[in-house]
Image (cartoon, rainbow, N blue to C red):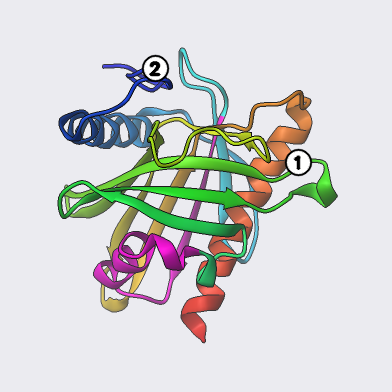
Amino acid sequence: MKFGKNSVEADDIWTREQFKAEAARILDVSWQVMHTAEWRLQKQSAVGDAFSAKPPGMNQIFKIKGVVDMAPEALLQLLFDNPDEYAKWNPVIVESLLLERVGERAHVSYQVTAERLGGLVARRDFVVLSAWQERDGALVLANVSVPHPAAPPPNTYIRGENRPGCYVIRPVPGESNKSRVEWYLDTNLKGWLPQKILDAAFCSILTENLKNLKNYISK
């Protein structure tokens, strides 16, 4: 099993079967990393607790844990179903577009993220394969960067890379309208940025993402 890298080179043109195979791979990889990495607490807040880990053969990765006021199935629908509407609940994403559906449980989308840390981290764009499944009583939504002919690397942004990462959504016992959420992120923003700035950016992205999600749900 490959960790921390995509299985096909970025200049390849993927077939539908390759997308399906990659979807299955990232669901396995991200689940294993989520449950075997030695997570270290980085920051506690009212939004959620942020962690980092350095699994063998991987860069440093980041995770946040928290509880949101939405049932697991409804939360999965919000996070997965309509990529064109991601920016409505998450201002970290300034543009999002569905490129291709790969069956009922996977799709490819194009996303542009906002500047971070007062402009130290400029906008990045990503082409992302997302896929979900049920596993051990949880809903798992995994994602990874992939190439797609509808979104070649642009001249306007630096093309970032998402290595396998995932949301794990579990019910809260006795509270059917709540979900316990864990999200881990393994992203290469590219460019020439010091690791200290990158680490701060990732912790900020995770915390702000969960905060935006909670605020949207509470409206």
What type is the residue that disc 1 sits on? Val
Taking the image as shown, residue 29 lies to the left or right of residue 213, namely left
Using the image as rendered, state which of residue 210 and residue 136 is in the foreground: 210
Residue occupying the far bottom of the picture? 219
Q: Residue at x 82, y 41 (%)?
A: 120
In this rendering, the answer to whether 112 lies above or below 72 is above
Q: Position of residue 133 (x, y in %)?
A: 19, 49
Q: Single out the mark in the foreground, 1 or 2.
A: 2
- Asked which quadrant contains residue 35, the reply is top left
Using the image as rendered, state which of residue 31 and residue 128 is in the foreground: 128
Q: Which mark is residue 9?
A: 2
Q: Residue at x 61, y 64 (%)?
A: 91
Report crowding for label 1: few under 14, some 14 to 19, many 20 or more residues within 10 A (C-alpha): some
Q: Which mark is residue 121?
A: 1
Report crowding for label 2: few under 14, some 14 to 19, many 20 or more residues within 10 A (C-alpha): few
SS category of the residue bearing label 1: loop
Q: Position of residue 136 (x, y in %)?
A: 16, 47
- Stretch of the chain drawn in magenta: 61-86
80 is within the stretch colored magenta = yes
**Quadrant into which the N terminus falls:** top left
84 is within the stretch colored magenta = yes
In this rendering, the answer to whether 82 lies above or below 62 is below
Q: How many marks?
A: 2
Taking the image as shown, residue 89 lies to the left or right of residue 79, namely right
